[in-house]
Amino acid sequence: KRAHTLLRSGQFTLAVEQLQTVLEIQEKLVPWQKPTLTVPTLSALAVCYHDLDEPERAFGTAHRALPAVRRYELKQYRAALLELLVEQ
């Protein structure tokens, strides 16, 4: 929640730090959790990287989230991720 608050307030560097920590933990938990667990975090990271003018990192992060979004039909993420990929 703190990372998303930082993201909404435009503090992208701090948000990235928080989100990276969350992602590391989530990736360790994925074998025991839903495979979609990391999608919100990856999406938020992609937005941060985009707003920090790091297009390669934004693209790579969005690309990592997209397979789960497609496979599990997470429509609320699909359009935003595809738009971000096209912009890069």
Image (cartoon, rainbow, N blue to C red):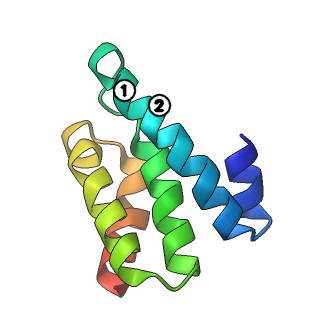
Q: Is residue 33 left or right of residue 6?
A: left
Question: Circle 2 — which element?
Answer: helix
Dot 1 alpha-carbon crowd within 10 angstroms: few under 14, some 14 to 19, many 20 or more: few
* Foreground of the two, 82 or 23: 23
- Vertically, is 2 above or below 9? above
Residue linked to disc 2 = 25
Q: Position of residue 5 (x, y in %)?
A: 77, 52
Q: Position of residue 33 (x, y in %)?
A: 36, 18
Going by the numbered disc 2, the residue's amino acid type is Ile
At 26% from the left and 62% from the top, the residue drawn is: 63
- Vertically, is 50 above or below 19? below
Location of the N terminus by quadrant is top right
Q: Position of residue 10 (x, y in %)?
A: 75, 71
* Foreground of the two, 54 or 47: 54
- Vertically, is 48 above or below 54? above
Dot 2 alpha-carbon crowd within 10 angstroms: few under 14, some 14 to 19, many 20 or more: few
Residue linked to disc 1 = 28
At 34% from the left and 22% from the top, the residue drawn is: 34
- Vertically, is 83 above or below 65? below
Question: Circle 1 — which element?
Answer: helix
At 44% from the left and 38% from the top, the residue drawn is: 24
Going by the numbered disc 1, the residue's amino acid type is Lys
Residue 22 location, quadrant: top right
* Foreground of the two, 78 or 39: 39
